[in-house]
Amino acid sequence: MGPREAHVDADYDVAIIGYGPVGQLLSLLLGERGHKTVVIERHENIYGMPRAAHFDDEIARILQAVGIRADSSAFIEPYDNWYEWRNAEGDTLLKVDWRGHGPSWWHTSNFFCQPELERALDARAGSQPAVTIRRGLSALDLSQDEHGVTISVAPAGESHRSAASETVTARYAIGCDGANSVVRERSRMPISDHGFFYDWLIVDMMPGEPMHFDPPAWQLCDPARPTTLVPGGPGRRRWEFMALPGENTEMLNSPETAWELLAPWGLTPENAAMERHTVYRFQARLAQKWRDGRALIAGDAAHLMPPFAGQGMCSGFRDANNLAWRLDLVLRGVTDDSVLDSYGPERGPHVQHFINFSMELGKVICVPDPAKARHRDLSMRASLVNPSPPPPAAPPRLGHGILRPHDSAAGLLSIQSRVKSRDDSGLFDDVAGRGWRILTTSGCRPRLDGRAADVLARLDMRILRLGEKADTDVDLIDLDGRYSGWFAQLGADTVIVRPDFYIYSVTDWNELPKTLAELDSQLPTPARPGSLNS
Ligand SMILES: Cc1cc2nc3c(=O)[nH]c(=O)nc-3n(C[C@H](O)[C@H](O)[C@H](O)COP(=O)(O)OP(=O)(O)OC[C@H]3O[C@@H](n4cnc5c(N)ncnc54)[C@H](O)[C@@H]3O)c2cc1C
């Protein structure tokens, strides 16, 4: 498909269907790279209902890249405490450590207000000259040929394909259209369901006076009413109440019921404002296929998980970050579009990790049966007093894709820390910029030519020498010594990091030409017009 793309008259490079947080981030990342992007969103305004409240340090690094800083945004509250799970008697069943900073430098855990974050992303995406946002339009159908995708759209509210009033064409269509994705459905991308689902009432509150809970984020695993209490960003608190057997959505989803359930927590209409409430069905689903030719999916369109680990939107942001650099390479003609094949295989296992973790947490709290809750309490309390704690869980890793095969660290997240260059200092991405990066502590001078030099130029890769003190050979001083610790842990002097912050390979400087040749072969250049495979 590659070479012909330059001659195709599609209206846009990319059409993004759905402008929730994932569509917003993806349109911004593509717009920043100058790709002509159209967004089709049925809602006229930002969706105001309560949903995500938590993101981790990796997501804070992604937000840093688009100018949203977790430590100084009015709608984000960095968290530095435990996330505790207690039974009805107040005994601790489980403690998740959400203290301190994570590998991406930002706080491991941050609470925020989703509509405010969406507003911030929307403002940035909307100011990109290459991005056109069309609200009030529903995508009804899509079809594709070798040149591009045609999307039939109609004013929001229409759901019949015959109601289509216009078509939009693009070289690629990305379905960021949420759980009931039209793009996924029309492109026949199957989704598997873990059969884990519960209804919960979600309530976002604005207490008149700050409320103090110790810790601020915890779960009450009381079979009489499983309840979540977490911060909701500055000035807000979030409560979530599970529907009990026999309760239906209508009963639960009323302000009266919400106030009744909030009363034991000391909240009344006199001392707090109820910002919004709604009932959601938590589910666990994962698409088996993420690409069909020129159509791909991201975010909730590709996966759903219960919110107990606070990772649904986070996973969607990782999808967008993974897809953005691939699309960029394809649209600039640097690689052929086979690079899009490995997007789903990479992301699927990573998301599965968080689906599994979220379901495990869900199995702890979604227990309305008192006998089962008693049994759970006994076994969990026994494991909590066990003096030898289990080894830390392995970090999630990308599945097979644009990663060096048989490489012990390929597919793991890289770290970010503070560095100092000749004329700047700060966080690595702020000082060194974004893109493919080769970080090395090797004292050897670069001598890369031939194929290695070609790959560097083609991918716009930068080589950055890190050291602990100023030296003529050092580009960046490792201000906190974190990079030297990281290199020691990796057992190598050179790391190739992709634009989405994941490790392509750890290697030795002397092996770099060979490693770059391997990368080169994974990213084939588009065939020339007229050649057989064009
Ligand atoms: C109660 C709750 C708590 C949560 N807590 C967390 C948390 O703490 N941390 C976390 O990371 N995640 C959390 N999540 C998950 C998170 O909210 C979602 O993963 C995230 O909002 C998904 O973003 P998205 O952009 O993929 O999809 P959505 O936000 O669903 O956006 C999809 C968009 O597509 C539009 N659309 C759909 N179909 C069409 C069409 N045919 N044409 C045009 N437009 C269309 C919709 O109008 C919508 O705007 C939570 C979810 C819930 C319900």
Image (cartoon, rainbow, N blue to C red):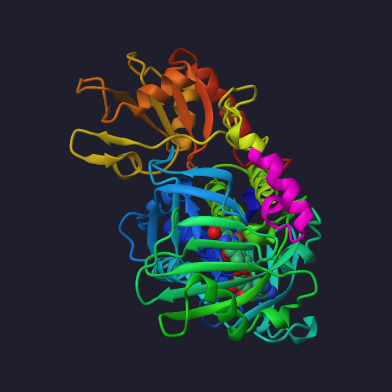
Q: Residue at x 72, y 83 (%)?
A: 250
Tell me the magenta residue range: 362-381
Asked which quadrant contains residue 197, the reply is bottom right
The image quarter in which residue 519 lies? top right
Indicate the position of residue 483 as horizontal and vertical percent values: 36, 27
Depth check, front residue: 333 or 223:
223
The reply to whether the magenta stretch includes residue 363 is yes
Residue 47 visible to an observer of this rendering? no
Q: Can residue 459 be seen at all in this image of the molecule? A: yes
Say above or below: 486 vs 35.
above
Residue 424 % position (x, y): 21, 40
Q: Main secondary structure of the magenta part?
A: helix
Quadrant in which residue 307 is drawn: bottom right
Quadrant position of the C terminus in the picture: top right
Ligand 1 lies in quarter? bottom right
Residue 40, image x, y percentages: 59, 74
